[in-house]
Image (cartoon, grey):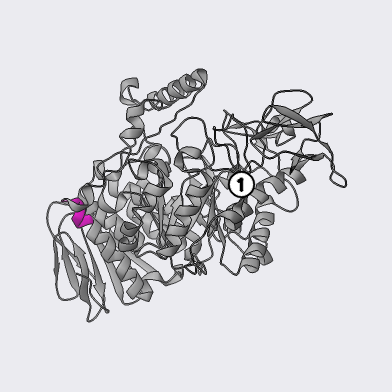
Amino acid sequence: MTEYRVWAPAAEQVEVEVAGAAHPLRPAAGRPGWWAGEAPAGAYGFRLDGGPALPDPRSPRQPQGPDGPSLAVDHAAFAWSDTPWSGRALPGSVLYELHVGTFTPAGTFDAAAERLDHLVALGVDFVELMPVCPFPGRYGWGYDGVGLWAVHEPYGGPDGLKRFVDAAHRKGLGVVLDVVHNHLGPSGNYLPAFGPYFTDRHHTPWGAAVNLDASGSDEVRAYLIGSALAWLRDYRIDGLRLDAVHALADDRALPFLEELATEVDRLAAATGRPLFLIGESDLNDPRTTNPRQAGGLGLTAQWSDDFHHGLHALLTGEAQGYYGDFAEDPYAAVAKALTRGFFHDGSRSSFRGRRHGRPFPAGYGHRLLGYLQTHDQVGNRATGDRLSATLPPGRLAAGAALVLTSPFTPMLFMGEEWGAGTPWQYFTDHTDPQLAEAVRQGRRREFAEHGWAAEDVPDPQARATVLGSVLDWSEPALPPHAELLGWYRTLIRLRRSCPELMDQDLAAVEVRHDRERGWLVVHRGPYRVAVRIGGSGPVDVPLDTPNGRLLAAFGEVAPGEGVLRLGPDSVAVVGSGRGSG
């Protein structure tokens, strides 16, 4: 017999259905709204007031998908390897974001684990997995997931995720998991039937907000925090990336994120492993990562779109949408982000039509993740085109150098390191025909407003869309991909061997630039990172450093007396220390 428990505060009668037989549950003593009782073990669901069997909100496994019955998982039964893993702190690390379903043709945890040696050779420290909770169909981004305690079965289910984490740890790689607390997918979301998991007090782009501050929110918070801790405890994940935390509407005196961070710190102390939280936020508010003792929420780090937007505008010249704020002078935008953290630190945003942000504390650059590409910034483009689709290798190399020698915590997006020739597009596999058509038409309408013809926008439901987004693993060995991959490896090695290139103090960073001649130089202690964007011939770039020598270069680079001659779309790292070629 197995004990079953569920929170269903509005129900008059609750049963657990196992193998077609219903077994009554009783109100749990001392736990208002909870029901409990014993029944045989097996695939199960909960029936509320005589209704159909529904999946367990805390189901650890959904073998038939979000709409099917739930199944218990004995986490203690998994045979972890004997390789000791004491964890890894986030500061000083390099992250690598990947999507399990398109990282390899097989699209499984086990197949992804077979490619971990590539990441070890690259030199990264953490693999950041996009969401793995169950979602409808076989493939999707994962941000419309449901069942926040379970693992998508087509990827390999709970044991598949554990095997991947175990394999990563054996190779010295930590694992970060992207989780979504701000909304659940429109299909397969049965939480409203059980209790007030959502509230009309607030509204988000996805509809009613997750209930973090209305009646019943204590249990909703416990549900989300319990899920987060389960990933860190039962799956030995090292950190969580929290999707769109600015959409977590919360008016309580104790913010949900602060409560979550507190509980994660407690688990870290109990396990003896460093555990961390990374937030995605567009508020440009340093309180997101400020310590709780200083009035902050206590997250370890957050994504930094300002740095990305400035860098993107610099490399591409794009000025539409939110890039407009950065495209007026992209050299100055990148310089401000590198030295101040936030570009919008109280300054006016023309895109928002108001002032935005507040100053970021100078000594904590590692609290910001810096990146050239992400799943969002690639996949949310009309055709999912990567930078490599339009930029020459030299310009990609320049962008990589600015990221990997920055005072931020660098993050790469899968395939970026070799300039992947495959796009990464928006794809879904909704089993509800009406929802599938709504997503398809909504995508076309969205981009039609920006001048795209409907036939040019990939069909999210088409199998060809997801197949075309799978990485081509023959590319890394071929030119020009191999040269770019070697450059990424060189930059990461330099970052490791030159502590000044990891220095998190924004105040110690100096940036000089000349927009007319197309160059920018970042001063990192005795090192100089010089980039040239575009141009028609070589220019002399002043370095202002004595006894510097060329440590690494990509493109047309010639050292001179106190200057560096850079050809179009070239980049070099100069300074003292061991050269990497």
Q: Main secondary structure of the magenta part?
A: helix
Which quadrant is the N terminus positioned in? top right
Outermost residue toward the right in this view? 29
Residue 365, image x and y in percent?
Answer: 47, 65
Apparent side of residue 211 relative to residue 85 in the rendered image (left or right): right
Q: Nearer the viewer, residue 385 or 223?
A: 223
- In the rendered image, the vertical position of residue 253 relative to residue 426, given as above or below: below
Residue 147, image x and y in percent?
Answer: 60, 39
Apparent side of residue 195 relative to residue 72 in the rendered image (left or right): right
Q: Nearer the viewer, residue 66 or 355?
A: 66
Which quadrant is the C terminus positioned in? bottom left
Badge 1 density bin: few <14, some 14–19, many ≥20, Cα 10 Å: some
Q: Which residue is mark 1?
A: 73
Outermost residue toward the bottom in this view? 547
Residue 176, image x and y in percent?
Answer: 49, 55
Residue drawn 46% across the image and 70% down it: 505
Span shown in magenta: 479-484
Residue drawn 54% across the image and 32% down it: 64
Q: Secondary structure at mark 1?
A: loop
Q: Nearer the viewer, residue 235 or 530?
A: 235
The three-letter code of the residue at mark 1 reads Val
- In the rendered image, the vertical position of residue 308 relative to residue 141, given as above or below: below
Q: Is residue 329 visible?
A: no
> Which quadrant would residue 23 be assigned to in this image?
top right
Magenta region includes residue 443: no
Residue 342, image x and y in percent?
Answer: 48, 56
* Numbered label tally: 1
Q: Is residue 537 visible?
A: yes
Q: Nearer the viewer, residue 535 or 167?
A: 167
Apparent side of residue 8 relative to residue 477 in the rendered image (left or right): right
